[in-house]
């Protein structure tokens, strides 16, 4: 059985990587946002999390005076805002993709010292981190591959214990599925997600997630058997009848993303706030 994740507790995962979790548990964040510290001498930190004085203190304890780089997987508010106070406290450089369009869920103050792009590699003492652009959950989402360990830090591209919410307009279901499929071509030993525990058998997990999304899409199409045309709110209880109603407001976003994908493929149409499945 996996141990309970305790915010602020520094957990060593192996001789190169440790984890400390922010005190922001919730429906969207699970046990909280994971921050990973990589290295033995000069250190890299991945995802400093939300603005939080207790989490800042925990990160500073974990890195001592050795932090050189702060990597952000994306700019949602539970992943990147903590970079500012951590940079000020340590002098470390902040790295990440260019900011995403402001959709009300972005850290609009995010300003990386170095903008990373697909395939960029940062080398430090004894390890290399390679940026892999994985849009879909967010257009500016990067995963980071620790090449020596074949460990992929996935941010919100893959979460443990839950599926990722895809929130249009910045979130895109078509692009998300393409980014998931891309992981199948990588030589991976494990996934270190932004929320939850490390995931072994990474390709099996990716295939499971792809299958889950396709089953959900089938439920979207089947829901039109109850009402056609239908609004998002009319489809929602049929498509997500297997999750608690308290999750429905969040699930509605992913439903919207599924419908946009289906419309792009010509399988449904939209007009005046309703969606129609052709006869």
Image (cartoon, helix red, strand yellow):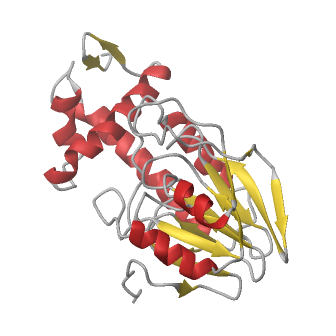
Residue 246 at x, y = what percent?
Answer: 16, 52
User: Which corner quadrant of the image does residue 218 belong to?
Assistant: top left
Residue 57 at x, y = what percent?
Answer: 47, 75
At horizontal 18% and vertical 31% (from top left) the residue drawn is: 233
Q: Nearer the viewer, residue 6 or 147?
A: 6
Residue 8 at x, y = what percent?
Answer: 42, 79
Image quarter (top left, top right, bottom left or bottom right) of the N terminus: bottom left
Q: Nearer the viewer, residue 165 or 255?
A: 165
Q: Against 97, is 201 above or below? A: below
Image quarter (top left, top right, bottom left or bottom right) of the C terminus: top left
Q: Nearer the viewer, residue 228 or 52?
A: 52
At horizontal 71% and vertical 82% (from top left) the residue drawn is: 16
Residue at the top extreme of this rendering: 272
At horizontal 81% and vertical 50% (from top left) the residue drawn is: 120
Q: Residue 68 vs residue 190: left or right?
A: right
Q: Against 244, is 239 above or below? A: above
Residue 225 at x, y = what percent?
Answer: 20, 30
Q: Residue 83 vs residue 226: left or right?
A: right
Q: Kindly tell me whether residue 197 is visible in this rendering.
A: no
């Amino acid at each position: 059985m996996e141990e309970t994740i305790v915010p602020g507790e520094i957990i060593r995962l192996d001789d190169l990587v440790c984890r400390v979790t922010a005190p922001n548990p919730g429906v969207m964040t699970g046990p909280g946002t994971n921050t990973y510290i990589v290295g033995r001498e000069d250190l890299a930190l991945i995802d400093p999390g939300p603005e939080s004085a207790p989490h800042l203190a925990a990160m500073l304890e974990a890195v001592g005076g050795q932090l050189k780089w702060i990597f952000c997987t994306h700019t949602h508010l539970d992943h990147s805002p903590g970079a500012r106070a951590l940079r000020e406290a340590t002098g470390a450089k902040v790295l990440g993709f260019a900011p995403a369009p402001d959709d009300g869920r972005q850290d609009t103050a995010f300003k990386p010292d170095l903008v990373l792009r697909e395939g960029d590699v940062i080398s430090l003492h004894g390890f290399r981190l390679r940026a892999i652009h994985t849009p879909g959950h967010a257009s500016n989402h990067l995963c980071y591959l620790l090449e020596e360990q074949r460990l992929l830090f996935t941010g919100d591209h893959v979460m443990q214990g839950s599926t990722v919410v895809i929130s249009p307009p910045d979130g895109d279901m078509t692009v998300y599925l393409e980014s998931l499929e891309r992981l199948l071509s990588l030589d991976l030993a494990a996934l270190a997600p932004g929320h939850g525990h490390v995931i072994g058998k990474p390709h099996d997990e990716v295939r499971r997630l792809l299958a889950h999304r396709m089953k959900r899409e089938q439920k979207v199409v089947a829901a039109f058997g109850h009402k056609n045309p239908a609004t998002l709110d009319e489809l929602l209880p049929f498509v997500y009848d297997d999750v608690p109603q308290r999750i429905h407001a969040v699930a509605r976003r992913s439903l919207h993303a599924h419908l946009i994908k289906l419309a792009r493929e010509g399988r449904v149409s939209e007009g005046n706030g309703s969606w129609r499945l052709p006869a």
